[in-house]
Amino acid sequence: MRNRVLLVAALGLLWVGAISARLYELQVLRYEHYQTKARRQQQTVVELDPPRGTIYDARGRELAVSVEVESAWADPADLDDPAATARALAPVLGIDAGTLARRLARDGNFVWLARKLDPRVSQAIRRLSLRGIHFLPESKRCYPMGELAAQILGYVGTDNQGLAGLELLYD
């Protein structure tokens, strides 16, 4: 009977020791790994502005319209090599590779690369098939009649907020 009690006690101690060793590994040795993993799982909120309404002249011609374009952003946590990604993107975006590499090397999960891209630039970035590079649809304000009534229409900023004229008045 005494041998059985010692055997059960020894197995119990081994079991507690194994659990303690595993907890030490997870909480102390692999702390940074799980901390990084937890940061990636946090929700990032990016507010997107809805498209602005069309402005017409008295004859029904469009003076100001919103068109859908794409903006490029990166998740630095998903990039394998920020410097190589920056070298690939720099000529397409017309940005200095060193500056872009510093932005991509930051901590966090969201970095704007370029806002409201021309469709050709957007397609050129897509063709690179870079890991960690993503796109968001945004609206861009266009004025089909050019400078006609520009002083009255006004203009909008990058965030689609009216800054002058009717654009500001009816923001």
Image (cartoon, rainbow, N blue to C red):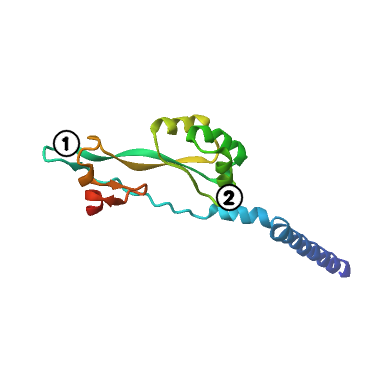
Tally the numbered discs. 2
**Residue 115: which quarter of the image?**
top left
Q: Which mark is residue 61?
A: 1
Mark 2: few/some/many CA within 10 Å (<14, 14-19, 20+) = some
Question: Up-down: is 74 above or below 127?
Answer: below
Place of residue 70 in the rendered image (x, y in percent of width and height, measured from the top left): 40, 39
Residue 37 placement, left or right of 20: left
Query: Are circles 2 and 1 on residues that touch, CB within 8 Å?
Result: no
Q: Residue at x 48, y 53 (%)?
A: 44
Residue 3 placement, left or right of 142: right
Place of residue 121 in the rendered image (x, y in percent of width and height, measured from the top left): 44, 32
Per the model, the C-alpha gap separating discs 2 and 1 is 47 Å
| Amino acid tagged 1 | Arg
Q: Which mark is residue 106?
A: 2
Residue 59 placement, left or right of 132: left
Question: Up-down: is 39 above or below 56?
Answer: below
| Amino acid tagged 2 | Arg
**Circle 2: element type:** loop
Question: Which residue is more in the foreground, 38 or 162?
Answer: 162
Mark 1: few/some/many CA within 10 Å (<14, 14-19, 20+) = few
Place of residue 120 in the rendered image (x, y in percent of width and height, measured from the top left): 41, 30
Question: Up-down: is 5 above or below 81?
Answer: below
> Is tag 2's residue or tag 1's residue first in the polypeptide sequence?
1
Question: Which residue is more in the foreground, 31 or 105?
Answer: 105
Q: Which mark is residue 143?
A: none
**Residue 146: which quarter of the image?**
top left
Residue 43 placement, left or right of 68: right
Q: Residue at x 47, y 30 (%)?
A: 124
